[in-house]
Image: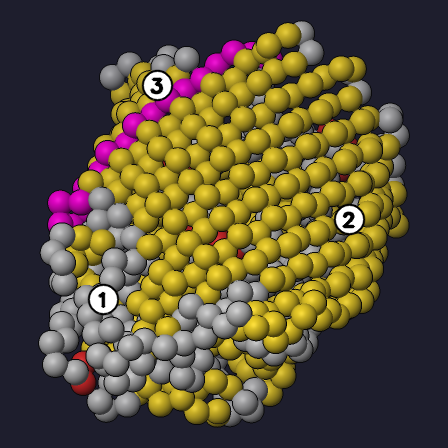
Amino acid sequence: MGAMLCSSASIAQDAAGETPQAPTTGSQLASTQQQEPASAFGDIVVTATRREARLQDVPVAVTAITGAGLAAADVSTLRTLTQVVPGFIGSRNMGVFQPVIRGVGSTGISIGDEPNIATYVDGVYQPESAANWIDLVEVERVEVLRGPQGTTFGRNATGGLINVITPDPSFDFRGKASVRVGRMRNDAGDYDARMYVTGPISETAALDFASLFRKNDGYIKDLVRGGTLGGQRVIDLRSKLLLKPADNVKVVLTGEFFDQQSTTNAPQPIDGNTLGRAFPGVILPRGPWEASLTRVPVLDLRRWTAALHVSVDLETVNLESTSGFLNLRWYQETDSDASNVDIGNFPALFATESGSSELKLSSTNAGPFQWLVGGYFYQFGGHADLSPFATTTPPSPLVGPHLQPELSGRSFAGFGEGTYELSGGLFVTLGGRYTTEKRSFTQILNGNTVANDVSKTFNKFNYKVGVRYEITSRTNVYATHSTAFKSGVYNMAATLSTPVLPEEITAYEVGLKTDPLPWLRINIATYYYDYKNLQLQARAANSSAYILQNAGNAEIYGGELETFISPVDGLKLRAAVAYTHARYQDFTAAQGFIPRGSGGNIVATTDASGNVMTRAPKWSGNFGADYTTAMGGGTFGAGANLSWSSRVYYDFLNIFSQPSYTLTNASIFWTPDSQAWKASLWVTNLTNEKVFQTIRPGAFSTDGFYEQPRKIGASFEVRF
């Protein structure tokens, strides 16, 4: 359907297409008994507080997007949530997903250097940035929580989190299959085929199976070999087994296989800024979506995951156990100078495994006191083979260190949170989490061990204090004070045996959620962050590798406004705007890059205090419209989604940036009254906007990767 489905006004539906109901407190129950017109946007149910609750009741800034909304806006991975979530930037570096919320986000690419925007799938923490190209076939909804979630979610949720929820198998047999075909520049095809089927296998067991095949031809012109780069092929297979051995027991076992092969790792120099331009025979791109690289880039990834969720209803309490396992293998090879001159290259092979387990006990009664307590365990181990070769005098041989780092870690945490209704409509929340985490590091340099199983332990208590007041049954105000942290980490591309310091954030937030009229919804959130010891990564001064450092302090404040309007039947409008003031306050030893006249950049230690933080645009927002009407024995629909951003900086000195931009997607569809099938026409990046996914300043070049150009296509879906 249209892009309006891609908002927090999108009703989170269960597998049967009905809105799930959240538990109610005493005052909420009284409110629902009042005879008031229902909201046009429904009672959206989210799990942002680790229990089901109405979106308008939770004291957290949340945007919820349904699976239908993801498809409508062509949000095929979590990275492209940028187009529908205010205050969110889905950046990437090489093959690593680097989400940013309200200016808080990790720049690390190392295994064991998890992002500080946590990602969860069905309650299972997803630790590795390279593995978080989540592209699930059947998604019930995605919740994006803005602000620290350091108590109940806890681990590495310094700036917020992305929560992906997929439907459980159904005891009613049903399924669907769809095909999408599109075209981009250079006559590049874009193909997407997916299927989902679910049904019972006994009276107490149900199964589902989801499959995805996605492929796009190269749309980046290869100026060296001819043909194109930027192609991608993805296979995703996922299955869930649901067991109901008793009315009060539910067991869900999940398995998934994901495989990607691509050449999307094809950077191009920005404004010709590459050291390669000083040498004869250099070929420089003259426009976007062109590349001139020494070798064909590689970005291949294979991921296996498994999860087990057990829930037991003990009448007044609910006992839940959630465990997960991840095995990841990926290989990337990227040109470090973005030119056809053989100056720098960074091949890297990564392998990692991780496992987690959480046990949680929560209240289920409708009394004034709601609580939950739990314990969490996480462990990971991984190794890499890195060869960041470089030379500044081609065609002399590329030289560089051969690094074989090994990283591992173990984390334990205990947490609890309680909410008490002091009087009618006045709720107070207290929460806390204690974490102890150990990190270990071994580095082998050119066959010699230079750091042998060194380790460090980090301990931290985080807390949350909140108050919410239900002014009316349709209006809530809230205020929270919370903290979160990310432990210190080792840099896999360094020989140093000392980790960077933990980063910590202290946050204050005030918000309003109101449905003043049945056709109007308004959500407002304002916040202030004191952010200490930011962990930041930058390219090294004289190689293709990276350094990891701390910035002393940063100050961030701002807010978001989301409005949803349904002026007439069949028409829904959405508008959101985010303001972010993000500045480094104490960053006197920043890795700075200053353009050199002959190409490349001078690298110098500089004072970046007072500068705008990277990937933190001052203004951003989106607008969506969705219209449906009866037509020809069925339903016709049209939708559009527009997202925009002011200037985005990608370096500490605020020299390199993506200028302000606007992205527009649109679609139309028709489905018969039986809804047995649906046909659609769609376009993404309608105006063919040139937008960088990321910009990477370094000694050898300043390069970047563009978002995909305009794509036009059609899709057809059948349901059975």
Q: Secondary structure beneath disc 2? A: strand
**Foreground tag (2 vs 1):** 1
Which is nearer the N-term, disc 2 or disc 1? 1
Q: Residue 718, which numbered label?
A: 3
Question: Is 605 placed above or below 457 here?
Answer: below
Residue 472 left/right relative to 680: right
Residue 188 is at least partly visible in this image: yes
**Foreground tag (3 vs 1):** 1
Q: How is the image coloured?
A: secondary structure
Q: Is most of the magenta stretch helix, strand or loop? A: strand
In which quarter of the view is residue 463 placed?
bottom right
**Residue 170: image location, x then y, percent:** 58, 18
Tag 2: amino acid: Tyr
Tag 1: amino acid: Thr
Residue 509 is at least partly visible in this image: no
**Magenta range:** 171-188
Nearer the observer, 620 or 305: 305
The local crowd at label 3, few if under 14, some if 14 to 19, many if 20 or more residues have their Cα within 10 Å, is: some
Residue underneath mark 2 = 376
Which is nearer the N-term, disc 3 or disc 1? 1
**Residue 98: image location, x then y, percent:** 48, 60
**Residue 367: image location, x then y, percent:** 87, 36
Question: Is 665 placed above or below 37 here?
Answer: below
